[in-house]
Amino acid sequence: MEKVTVQSWKDYRRAFIAAVEKEQTVMAVMFALVGITTVFIIFVVFYMIVSHKSKDIGILKSIGVSNANIIKLFSGFAFLLGLIGSVVGAIFGWLFLLKINQMEDWLFEHFKFQLWDRTVYAIGDIP
């Protein structure tokens, strides 16, 4: 009698599951680093803006502008900068995604670095 091997779907697709779990971990770390860096950069930028505008804030207060209106002014400026940054970031992100397969091919040709393991995934290009 021949030996029969029984495998669960997890055993059968072990390489794929390992790649997906690795990808999830890397993505979580990347998003955390990007988030922390973004918060820090935003804090530094607005701290510098407010510190450089202290004379302007003093002038506004001397002509009778309330603290609430000064806060609204800086909040509106922050919102406008955030909106512009979001639009520019979305455009550059879209352009990056259009060329990601060509960039991955270039990295592999010059540095033998492969982002997308074609032996694990069923498709050849990065979706």
Image (cartoon, helix red, strand yellow):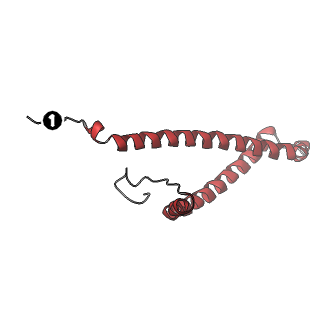
Judge whether residue 115 can be spotted in this image.
yes
Vertical placement of 65 versus 8: above or below? below
Q: Amino acid at mark 1?
A: Val
The percent coordinates of residue 2 (x first, y second) are: 11, 36
Q: Quadrant of the C terminus?
A: bottom left
User: Whole-percent x and y of residue 52?
Assistant: 86, 46
In-front residue for pair 48/11: 11
For this orientation, the residue located farthest to the left is: 1
- Residue that appears at 49% across and 53% down: 115
Q: In the image, is 111 to the left or to the right of 68?
A: left
Q: Of all residues shown, which one is farthest toward the front?
A: 1
Residue placed under numbered mark 1 in the picture: 4
Q: Work out whether 85 lies above or below 43.
A: below
Q: Is residue 63 above or below residue 92?
A: above
Quadrant location of the N terminus? top left
Residue drawn 51% across the image and 43% down it: 27
* Frontmost residue, 80 versus 124: 124
